[in-house]
Image (cartoon, helix red, strand yellow):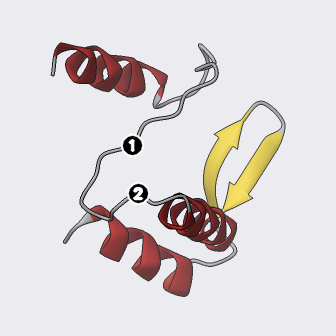
Amino acid sequence: MDCRSLMRRSARYFAEKTAIVHGERRLSFAAAWTRGLRLANALLALGYSDKEAVAAVKKVPEGLAVGDAIRQALKLLAKV
């Protein structure tokens, strides 16, 4: 199952369950899916293809659970 399918399924079956926690802020699976769709549609409107890889990181908080994974992915992308 790809990431998009996993997120869509999670948004459907676990809509109100917490998907992301950062400090006091929490985001449900449904909200994360909706925000992801908005971002994807905005990128498509700017002319990006669904086949292109895009990364946008303002600041990765140290306490964020996926922070290390994001940093590693950015290091790999920088080598491409």
Q: Is residue 62 above or below residue 39?
A: above
> x%, y% of residue 3?
31, 63
Q: Secondary structure at mark 2?
A: loop
Q: Is residue 78 above or below residue 25?
A: above
The reply to whether discs 2 and 1 touch (Cβ–Cβ < 8 Å) is yes
Residue drawn at x 75%, y 49% as measured from the top left:
26
Task: Look at label 1 and name its amino acid.
Answer: Val
> Quarter of the image holding residue 21?
top right
Residue drawn at x 63%, y 18% as measured from the top left:
61
Task: Look at label 2 and name its amino acid.
Answer: Tyr
Viewer-side residue, 40 vs 21: 40
> x%, y% of residue 55?
43, 36
Q: Report how far apart the C-alphas of labels 2 and 1 lie in the structure.
A: 9 Å
Q: Which residue is mark 1?
A: 54
Viewer-side residue, 42 vs 17: 42
Q: Is residue 73 above or below residue 25?
A: above
